[in-house]
Structure formats: structure tokens, C-alpha cells
């Protein structure tokens, strides 16, 4: 795809046409290619009505010659398979997410072994499992999860990158990470020679809380404050669309793929869910600057 700074003037697709979005009860998700020729960001939102459970997964693929797209699709394929198998019913949330990450890693290894062009599919992953009022999340790489109470950020995953390591050492501030030349050199990812080390988090879900899961194409362009404000929009689709539009505009002609999922539990939603009603079951699966392993 050739990036167009003024799509309407050049006969290119408008911003609305470039962004894929879908909304579900309590959730909104979307993505766009940005200035990249291919889309290596994939995501899925799954909902089980009877158990009041949701699984949100986002993957950002890495690798040339189609390996990045293959990798991200492989992560989502495994998430769907485990969900449909019902493993999340039998396992505690963190164990299920650990299983998801490890099986996705093995899937990418299998896909890489089948390639004849020497490409190696690698991917990040960030996943959130919500069962009733319990939330568990896991991530590998530099795709992020944020948890907000109102506009206050309660939790943020820590990237597995050389830039994040510099922040730990005091060589870089968190605000400088997005522009650091080593931001895209990852220390962990799925599909490498060794099983990934997965980071986990958990919390109780409270009314007024919101989650944002995003690829680096989003968080490099939007501040935590901006994400918190947009994640709390009453109209989730509008907030999501504005976030993706900002990321695309700021990324410019050479901007990365962008992918984002919002989940928000408002007070009225919380009260209604504890009454006799339940949201209808729904699921969605729509359907990059390259990273390098450090």
C-alpha cells in the first residue's frame, strides 16, 4: 500500500476506509496497515455467554517474505483453538494464558519449519482473559496492555526490548522509548529457538475500569494519558477510531501497522450484568516496520 498524506486529494482511500473496526458489547477493536505494504497485526475478541467470559488477544508479527503475517495469524489460530476447546474453563486464568503463549510459540516453530525460503515467523502477543470479575493477562514482546480506573493508569505491561532495558538502567526515560533506535530490538518473542518467558498480571474487575491492548504502532504515537481518555469514551467505537486515526496521522507515510482493543466496564454495565440480563455471545476476527531479535 502506498501511503497518501492527503488521501482525498490523490484518489486514495479515506481514513475511514483504511481503518477496520468492529464493536461488541463492552469491547471495540480495530486495526490499519499504516504506511506498510502488508498487515502483520492480528487480533481476536471472543465471548462465552454462559460463563460470562471473554478472551482478547493481539499479536504483532515479525519477519520478511510473509513470515510476519504468518506468525501473527498463527497466534490467533491457537487462541481460537484453545478457546473452542474450552481449556479456559478447566484452568486458572494465568495457566490458560501461559498455555496459549507456549502453544502459539510451538505453532510458529512448526510453521517456520515448513517454510522453504528460510524465513522465520516470530510474533509478540498480549492477551487478556476476563471471567466474571477476575482478570488475567499475559504478554511477550512489546505489544502492551494498559488497565485504567477512570483515566488513572493502574497497570501497564513492561516491554521486552532493548529500549526498555535502557529505561531500567536509567539511560532513557519512558517518554523517549518510542523514538529510540533500539526500540524494535526485542529480547523476547514467540517463535524463537527457546520457549518464551511469559510475563503475567491479574486483578479484580471493578466498574469504571477499562483495558487497552495495542501494538507498538499505537503506543509509540499515543501517550498513556491519551489512551486512558479514549478508552473511557462512552461511545467506544468513536474512541477507538479516534485513537487509530491519531496513530496513523502521527506515524505518517512510513508509519507502522496499528492495532488496538478497548474493553470498558461502566457502572450501568456492571449493574446490568449482575441482574437478569447477559450480553449476547459474539466473537470477531478481522480478516510493519520489521523488528529484529537482539
Image: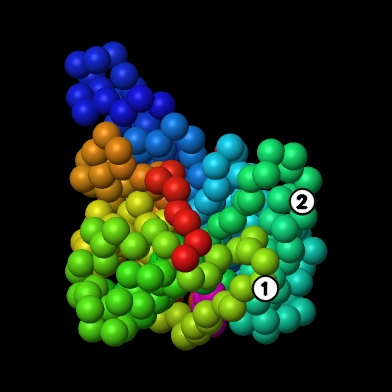
Q: Magenta stretch mostly in which secondary structure?
A: strand
Q: Residues within 10 Å of mark 2 (few under 14, many from 20)?
A: few
Q: Secondary structure under badge 1?
A: loop
Residue linked to disc 2 = 113
Q: Secondary structure under badge 2?
A: helix
Q: Is residue 114 visible?
A: yes
| 62 w.r.t. 245: above or below | below
- Which residue appears at 53% of the width and 51% of the height? 62
Viewer-side residue, 182 vs 241: 182
Question: In which quarter of the view is residue 36 placed?
Answer: top left
Instruction: Work out whether mark 2 precedes mark 1 in sequence or the reverse, and give the earlier one.
Output: 2
Q: Is residue 158 left or right of residue 226?
A: right
Q: Position of residue 216 (x, y in %)?
A: 37, 57
Q: Is residue 193 left or right of residue 40?
A: right
- Which residue appears at 20% of the width and 16% of the height? 9
Q: Position of residue 94 (x, y in %)?
A: 61, 82
Q: Residues within 10 Å of mark 1 (few under 14, many from 20)?
A: some
| 15 w.r.t. 115: above or below | above
- The quarter of the picture where the N terminus appears is top left
Q: Which residues are magenta?
A: 133-138
Residue linked to disc 1 = 195
Q: Position of residue 161 (x, y in %)?
A: 41, 69
Q: Is residue 199 left or right of residue 269?
A: right
Amino acid at each position: 500500500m502506498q501511503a497518501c498524506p492527503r488521501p482525498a486529494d490523490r484518489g486514495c482511500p479515506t481514513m475511514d476506509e483504511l481503518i477496520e473496526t468492529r464493536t461488541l458489547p463492552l469491547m471495540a477493536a480495530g486495526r490499519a496497515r499504516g504506511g506498510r505494504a502488508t498487515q502483520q497485526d492480528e487480533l481476536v475478541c471472543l465471548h462465552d455467554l454462559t460463563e460470562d467470559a471473554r478472551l482478547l488477544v493481539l499479536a504483532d508479527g515479525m519477519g520478511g517474505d510473509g513470515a510476519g503475517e504468518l506468525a501473527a495469524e498463527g497466534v490467533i489460530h491457537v487462541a481460537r483453538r484453545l478457546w473452542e476447546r474450552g481449556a479456559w474453563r478447566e484452568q486458572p486464568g494465568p495457566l490458560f494464558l501461559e498455555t496459549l503463549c507456549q502453544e502459539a510459540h510451538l505453532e510458529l516453530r512448526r510453521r517456520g519449519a515448513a517454510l522453504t525460503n528460510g524465513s522465520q515467523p516470530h510474533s509478540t502477543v498480549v492477551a487478556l482473559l476476563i471471567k466474571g470479575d477476575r482478570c488475567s493477562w499475559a504478554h511477550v514482546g512489546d505489544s502492551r496492555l494498559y488497565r485504567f480506573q477512570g483515566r488513572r493508569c493502574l497497570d501497564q505491561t513492561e516491554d521486552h526490548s532493548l529500549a526498555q532495558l535502557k529505561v531500567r538502567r536509567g539511560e532513557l526515560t519512558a517518554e523517549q522509548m518510542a523514538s529510540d533506535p533500539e526500540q524494535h530490538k526485542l529480547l523476547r518473542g514467540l517463535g524463537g529457538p527457546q520457549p518464551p518467558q511469559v510475563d503475567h498480571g491479574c486483578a479484580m474487575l471493578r466498574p469504571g475500569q477499562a483495558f487497552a491492548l495495542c501494538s507498538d504502532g499505537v503506543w509509540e504515537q499515543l501517550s498513556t494519558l491519551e489512551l486512558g481518555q479514549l478508552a473511557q469514551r462512552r461511545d467506544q467505537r468513536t474512541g477507538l477510531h479516534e485513537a487509530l486515526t491519531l496513530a496513523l496521522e502521527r506515524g505518517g507515510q512510513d508509519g507502522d501497522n496499528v492495532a488496538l482493543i478497548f474493553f470498558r466496564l461502566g457502572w450501568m454495565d456492571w449493574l446490568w450484568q449482575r441482574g437478569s440480563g447477559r450480553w449476547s455471545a459474539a466473537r470477531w476476527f478481522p480478516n510493519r516496520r520489521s523488528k529484529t531479535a537482539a
